[in-house]
Amino acid sequence: MVTHYHCRNNQRRELIRTSKGANGQPLLNGIDYLEVSPDQKTLKLHFIHNLSTPSLTEENWVILRNDQAADISITSTSSFANILTLRINHPGDKVGNYKLRLISLQNESPPPEGFDPQLSTVEFSFRADELSEFDCLTTATDTGLQAQIPPIDYLAKDYASFRQLMLDRLNITMPNWRERNPADVGVMLVELLAYAGDRLSYYQDAVATEAYLGKARQRTSIRRHARLLDYPMHDGCNARVWVRLEVSQAGDGQKLLGASKKDLRPGAKLFTKREDKLPKQPTGEEYAGLLNKGVQIFETMHDITLYKSHNQIYFYTWDAEIFYLEAGAIHATLNNENNDLNLQVGDVLIFTQVLGFDSGEPAEADLTQRHVVRLTKVKPYQDPLYQKDLLEISWAAGDALPFHLWITNVVNDTVIKNISVAQGNVVLADHGCTITAELPLVPETGRYRPQLQFGPVTQQGYVQYRRQPFNPKATAKEALIWDMRHILPQIYLKELDPNSHWLPQRDLLNSDSFAREFVVETEDDGSAFLRFGDNESGKQPAPQTQFRVTYRIGNGSSGNVGSAAIQQIEPQFQTWITKVDNPIPAQGGTDPEAIAQVRLYAPQAFRTLKRAVTEDDYGAITKRFPTVREAVATRRWTGSWYTVFITVDREGGQPIDGKFKQKLTDFLEAYRLIGQDVKIDSPIFVGLDIGLKIQVAPDYFNSQVKEALQNTFSNRILPNRQLGFFHPDNLGFAQPVYLSQVITRAMEVAGVVSVTIQRFQRWGQSTADNIKAGKISLNRLEIARVDNDLRTPQNGKIEFEMEGGL
């Protein structure tokens, strides 16, 4: 590649080329351009016109660098036509430029006669063999006069400032244009560009704002940032409630269908207020109208067969005039005198107090004395005295009664019967209303992110590792408990052609390229958008696909309605369902997580313990399991490998049975260290032997004071909902029992004047050291226990020797 080096004055060169004398010969000659040979030792000068004889010699040329003579000399010259070839002694330096100047032999300044002074010097370099990223065309030299640059307002960020900025610049560049009429084409173009700049500026600001967790304002951006930090932001959850239905004879044996995800069938709708005209299938607009009237809609979650005999079921008291089910009870006997009860394992009953405990008046019934149980055993039985048919029912320890449930009582020599009853035909319902719509067609190109017309979308809790909202075999209590990490929106998509279903997910990170799954992204105003995959993480819907969407609306704490709030069912069921109510308030409705809370917690999510390595790790993770109150882990070498023995203390002193051990072991499987087995153990219970000598006040009965002391130091839940001193939830691993606390609690009982310690020791260990120390110390895996049961004294006892009183 050969580079041409021209003289800078192109206009002058053209004038020399075209100027002729009277004889038709050129008036002047000049350098057209210069070529540097690849070996950089030959310079070829091309003149505008042919050279005259005699030709120019090496003395007519000088090579300059920085306007001073360079150390390069011309050794020979030769010419032909308009080309003059100069040979030099050695190549020049590749750094910097050189000048080749034509001079006269008499005077070194001006060029010889017949050559133009402006075209007698050419600037060149010895970098002819190197590629350049710039145009090889030389430009005219700087005149030294700097043009005035109009000031630019770099703070211009909106339409008005952009418009003013462009008008100010046009005043400088086009001073004769003064038009400001909006109808003018120039003003129209300025305003159009200002609008485009305003949109672009907003886009830049929005991207810069949403790019960081600390600055983002949109809920979708916050959720995605938090997910990258392994923090699952939730969008709230709907409420659930146990609803009791009463049926007439026409409804005996009728089956009420609940929600079905397989058929996309909604459950039966329940309403919190009575309305004369209820829509059979409410649309979004009708649902909004009901909300304006204060009506909340619930839908049943499962099928149920209703029986008239289950409307109200009476307990059997075995002829006792004073009878109640103790707190913690998991068994009861029902009167099946007419042999018409159809209770099955898995059915749900609500124990409800319907009469006043000490008056027998329905208006004075305690509304807090209501409890839900799921039956685990139903056994027919018979009273051998009267040959009456009975039903023995049992429920799980997780549904144990939290209070005394009174059945009969005697007030003023009058027996009050059926103070509390069992109510059947109980169905689980949750907040939300199902609607159906069609989404826009998937476009041929571009992003498909359709928006749902109505909101907020219902978010429903799920059982971990299961694709169902509750476990029908678990306790009734567990049906109202879920982890906010296991929440999914209640929405399903169905392609019209072909007939295929799409399911919602919290994210698409674990979705393969064939998974028909999508994500619902909800904003703070309740609006929801659907995001699909890209054929790598989740399948991308094909162009022109038509979706039918079935989703539920209704979410958050608005569904936490009070007891007796639900009063009506869909009109088509009102002919055989005579009454609808919820004896217990709805619960579980949670509002969407606040953005400020996510900003606070998400950066710390990585600190959450997700592996069990040390003994403390195993203990901390085990406490996350439901019903576990405390846990202590011990690593032991078992001959071939290590085994971690986890000693667990359950809430309420529940037993560590085989079923619980298996569930807990499965739970720990995701956390345990490879190569270590896990075994679940029960605590080492230490029975205590305590003897107190009580001085009773003169105006108190010994028997009443002693009964109060026994209740105070029991292991039960007292009628006032307080825990007994030796209740399992008051005692923990290695927790010492202090003598001062025992004396203090005894002195709080009315009628106690003084307390003298007679015994304060472990069961079977006679020693006075504990009295001197003021406490009974326990080891790491031990828990104190005082059942005070004469049949099992080894489980601890406390005795009271009463003095004084009446």
Image (tube, rainbow, N blue to C red):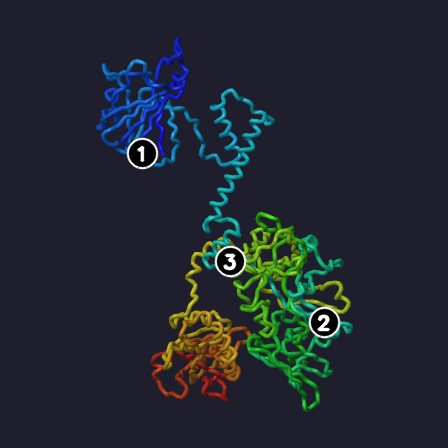
Q: Are marks 1 and 3 in contact (CB under 8 Å)?
A: no
Task: Compute the Cα span from label 1 to label 2.
Answer: 99 Å
State the CA–CA distance, disc 1 to disc 3: 69 Å
Q: Position of residue 793 (x, y in %)?
A: 46, 88
State the quadrant of the N terminus: top left
Helix, strand or loop at mark 3:
loop
For this orientation, the residue located farthest to the bottom is 385
Which residue does the image show at 41% across and 78% down from the upper left? Answer: 645
Q: Residue at x 50, y 53 (%)?
A: 222
Of 697 and 381, the residue lying toward us: 381
Kind of residue sitting beneath label 3: Met
Look at mark 3 in the image and give the residue it sits on: 233
Please state if 621 lies on the left or on the right of 551 as rendered.
Answer: left
Residue 16 appearing in the image: yes
Residue 38's mark?
Answer: 1
Q: Give the residue pinned by disc 2.
A: 255
Mark nearer the viewer, 1 or 3? 1
Please tell me which of labels 1 and 3 falls first in the chain. 1
Disc 1 packing (10 Å; few <14; some 14–19; many ≥20): some
